Image: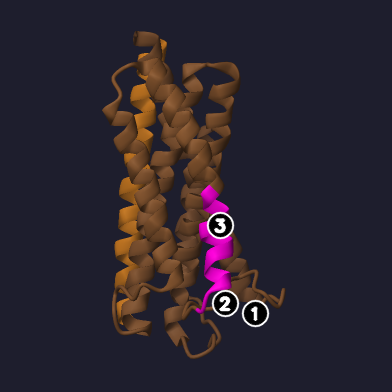
Amino acid sequence: MGKIIKYILFIWLAAVFCFALLAPIPALGNMGERARILFFHVPMAWVSTVAFIMALVYGIGYIRKRDILYDHKASSSAALGLLFAVLATVTGSIWARFEWGAFWNWDPRQTSIFVLILIYGAYFALRSAIESEEQRAKLSSVYSILAGITVPFFIFVFPRIVETLHPDPIVNTSGKLKMDSRMFMIFLSSLVGFTGLFAWMLSLKIRISKLTLQEK
Amino acid sequence: MDSYYLVLIVVLIAWLVVFLYMLSVEKKIEKVEED
């Protein structure tokens, strides 16, 4: 990633934060000002989904090519996915405290992200339990593939097939975008910014992995 | 509205810290890569 792009990313996300917190937004259902959480919470959940899917892709890469770097890429991606999943859970819980009256309500959305955090927590427990690098790469690649398959179910399917208090997702069952165009622009910009941040973080982690491998 | 500005300042400072930390990590990586 070029140096200029990083500075653009810094200014971009700083501008997104300014708009997300200060730009006037229309009332969204009965949420009022609490709807601003959307600009932070949804992009974090999106990035965690992308990261988990990338861990699956890298897992497949290792199984096919038996290159240890793919295993490092998969674990780096899963670690970032876990970080953003925790951030999405924390921001969602703060919103839930003011919207639903409690930080945790075992709502289907909360339950599904909690299960995903457990699944990827177990992935790292598995990795730390195996000493042989090759064995660890083999088993954790298979695990990351299996875990990755469950991600679309927990994020997109499960919360839609059971009753939930959670507001309609951006792409809802009626297929209509229920959002003011200005809000949508801020939301999209946030999505792009957070995805760029994830790409940068992942590239740093992969470069560190490469250096560690070279040292070995 | 004042609390919004306060939250914004906290968020911007946090983002600046993260950004500078990532730049410093990148600098260290570049140094090791050159060596």
Q: Which residues are magenta?
A: A150-163
**Label 1: few (<14), some or many (≥20) within 10 Å?**
some
Callout in the foreground (2, 1): 2
What separation in Å lies between label 2 and label 1 (alpha carbons)? 9 Å
Tell me where residue A10 appears, x and y as whole percent: 46, 49
Location of residue A86 with respect to A140 vertically, above or below: below
Q: Are marks 2 and 1 in contact (CB under 8 Å)?
A: yes
Chain where mark 3 sits:
A
Residue A153: mark: 3
Res A168 label = 2
Residue type at tag 2: Asp
| Viewer-proximal residue among B10 and A46 | A46
User: How many other residues sit within 10 Å of disc 2, few (<14), some (14-19) or many (≥20)?
Assistant: few
Residue A169's x, y, as percent? 58, 72
Quadrant where the C terminus of chain B is found in the figure? top left
> Which residue occupies 43% across, 18% down?
A210
The residue tagged 1 is A178
Q: Amino acid at mark 3?
A: Phe
Q: Main secondary structure of the magenta part?
A: helix
Mark toward the start of the polypeptide (2 vs 1): 2
The secondary structure type at the circle numbered 3 is: helix
Q: Chain of mark 2?
A: A
Q: Residue at x 36, y 84 (%)?
A: A100
Crowd rating for badge 3 (residues with CA inside 10 Å; few <14, some 14–19, many 20+): few
Judge by depth and name the residue closer to the eye, A54 or B23.
A54
Chain B: its colour in the image is: orange
**Is disc 1 placed on a helix, strand or loop?**
loop
Q: Quadrant of the N terminus of chain B?
A: bottom left
- Across and down, in percent, residue A121 comes to 33, 45
Say left or right for A12 vs A88. Answer: right
In the rendered picture, chain A carries what hue? brown
